[in-house]
Amino acid sequence: VSSAPSGQLEQLKALCPTLSVGVLSADLSDLGRQVEVLREAGVQVLHVDVMDGCFVPQMTAGPPLLKALKGVPLLKDAHLMIDRPLNKVADYVAAGADIVTVHLESEPAHIHRVLQQVAISASSAGREVVRGIALNPGTPVDAVAPLLAEVEMVLLLAINPGWGGQKLSPEVRPRLDRARELIAAAGRTILTCIDGGVTRENIGEIGSWGADLVVTGSAVFEGKTIERNFRSMFESLRKGR
Ligand code: DX5
Ligand code: ZN
């Protein structure tokens, strides 16, 4: 009997390379069924984009949405595009997020402390949470180096955050290469993730760049052929590797 990997990081690592599907691109009036369709299609990670109307112009749902997804047996990846997350991350851990990703730009003075706070919240809740650090396209990748002792994932935005359906910036490729160099030097298990502008056409190439997780929103839901879209994107991602 092969034992299933325990702990969120081990579970996630065992699934990589894989897609993390952005639920905000789903038909939100029918979220429960849409998630069921994703699960049946083979999706294993859900990406929940949280926007506060300050860090990015739009607003979406916060912990209540994650709480609503608590019973869904998939890993939940909360991408927090919110200002000053220090006092808010505990709510996302409590709401059942398996991955909590905060933006390096969102807590200028204390981002290191925010990452520690995620770990403190997780340990007081008696669970493991994968800590992600996200970087906007205009933030130098090397800024992540001093934080690598406190993260298990580095997420690079391939677009300016705030909206789905934008075009991927080619700059993200050298940025990913640099992030992977920094991670190798840090000597810890740290996954990489690309978010934004991923399409059925470019996913194979992105797979060949070596990212562990690739977020996709609009491309999976296009044409309402969710299962077919996901399966073909997943296959291209794996083939590109
Ligand atoms: C952007 C979000 C992304 C994005 C993905 O603010 O972080 O997750 O919505 O959507 P697509 O795949 O449509 O670019
Ligand atoms: Zn996102």
Image (tube, rainbow, N blue to C red):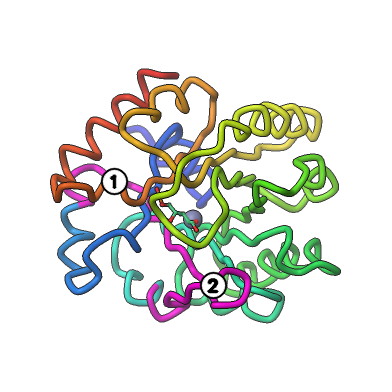
Tell me the SS state at disc 1: loop
What percent of the width, then of the height, locates residue 19?
A: 38, 41
Three-letter code, disc 2: Pro
Asked which quadrant contains residue 148, the reply is top right
Q: Residue furthest front?
A: 167
Asked which quadrant contains residue 18, the reply is top left
Residue at x 39%, y 23% (from the top left corner) = 204
Foreground residue, 76 or 1? 76
What percent of the width, then of the height, locates residue 178?
A: 73, 29
Foreground residue, 95 or 103? 103
- Quadrant where the image shows the N terminus: top left
N-terminal label among 2 and 1? 1
Residue at x 75%, y 53% (from the top left corner) = 150
Residue at x 76%, y 69% (from the top left corner) = 107
Q: Which residues are magenta?
A: 38-65
- Quadrant where the image shows the C terminus: top left
* Disc marking residue 43: 1
Three-letter code, disc 1: Val
Q: Is residue 71 found left or right of 130 in the rendered image? A: left
Tell me the SS state at disc 2: loop
The residue tagged 2 is 57
Is the CB of mark 2 within 8 Å of ligand 1?
A: no
Is the CB of mark 1 within 8 Å of ligand 1?
A: no
What percent of the width, then of the height, locates residue 239?
A: 35, 18
Foreground residue, 87 or 223? 223
